[in-house]
Structures are given as structure tokens and as C-alpha cells.
Image: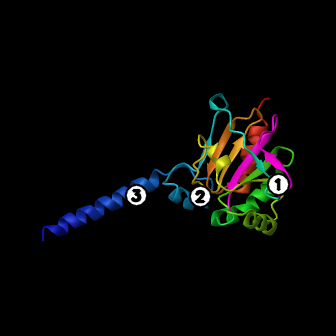
Amino acid sequence: MATRPRLRGRTLLAGLLLVLLTGCGGSAIDDTNAYDRQVLGGGKALTVVAPEDRKPAAVVTGPDLAGTGTVTSSRPGQVVVLNVWASWCGPCRQEAPELNAASKDLADDAVFIGLNVREASPDPGRAFVRATEVPYAHIYDPDGTQLIRFSADLSPSAIPSTLIIDRQGRTAVRIAGTVSRTTLVQLVRDIAAEPR
């Protein structure tokens, strides 16, 4: 009989902890990020770095997924949106239309680059780009060598994830998980409007 009060107490404690942990989650970008916050252990999905605290972003350069040459994230004087994705990633498929629309909205404000990771062959990534009609270039990074360069900013296991790099080549925003068109457009426009 002594186990019932103990069990009831544990159940009550577990429920209380669940309520507290739920209330302490990071700020959400939109409702779709609830999944990402759970997968990433409840960490913040979106981090905006104040200009005075920004550090130089890594530069990645690699073969174009389309097989037409080389793509680089080094774009002095331009805002860069770097999105990490893979064809097998469900949230990446969910996010693709949002990124496509944002890239068109922001054609005068930023350069978009995809970083296709963890694909044994470029073929699945190419099929993904064709099927989702992604309008910007992608670096093919099968073994994650380029992604590791961003280890100070992104978790290698956070797919999808997005970095916004300011005109001075510094990391301005880190997004772990999916992002909406509305949020991305607002963030990029704010960064593009900063004094040069």
C-alpha cells in the first residue's frame, strides 16, 4: 500500500516537470518549429546576433550540385542566406516552398545558397531541386566537410538549418529547423537595411 502514494507523488512530480519544461521552451519562429525544438532537445530555434556581437562566418566552397562548376558563400557586400538540407529530410521538403518564395521576394536583398549534405550521390539532391523547383545554387557536400566549417554556428545534426550572413561576412542569424517565408523575409530585410 505504501507504493500508491509514492507512485501518485511521482506522477504528480512528472506532470509538474512537464508543465515547467513546456513553459520554458525557446521562442518559436512559427508552429512548424515545435517539431524541430523537440528533435533538437528544446533549444532555441532562432538566434539573432546583435551587430556588435557578430563574428565572421565560415566560408564554404564546393562543387555545384548541378555539376556545372563551383559555388561559394563568399559574397562580400551582400547578405547571404545559407540553407542546409538533404533530400531524405521530411522537414526540408516542408520548408522548400517557403525558401523558394522567400528567395524570389528577396532577389534584390540577398543571395541564397543551399548546402546539400549527407547524400551518397548527387542524384537524389538534383531530383529534389527539380521537383521542388528551387531557383538558387547548391553546394554538394556528401561527407559534411563544408557543414563542419559552421560548427561554431550550427549543429551538424540540425537539418534543416539556415544561417543569415550580413554584408560584412558575419553570422547575423542562426535558425535550427524549418523557417517560414514571412520570418525569413523580415529577418533578411532588417539585416540588408543595416548601415554599411
Q: Earlier in the sequence, mark 3 or mark 2?
A: 3
Q: Nearer the viewer, residue 172 or 62?
A: 62
- Numbered label attached to residue 19: 3
Residue sitting at 82 percent across and 34 percent down? 77
**Residue 133 figure quarter:** bottom right
Kindly identify which residue carries mark 2: 33
Residue pointed to by mark 1:
136
Q: What residue span does the magenta drawing correspond to?
A: 67-86
Q: How many callouts does the rendering have?
A: 3
Q: Is residue 152 magenta?
A: no
**In the image, what residue type sits under mark 3?**
Val
Q: CA distance from mark 1 to mark 3?
A: 42 Å
Between residue 185 and residue 76, name the one nearer to us.
76
- Amino acid carrying mark 1 in the image: Tyr
Judge depth for marks 3 and 2 and give the one in front: 2
Q: Residues within 10 Å of mark 1 (few under 14, many from 20)?
A: some
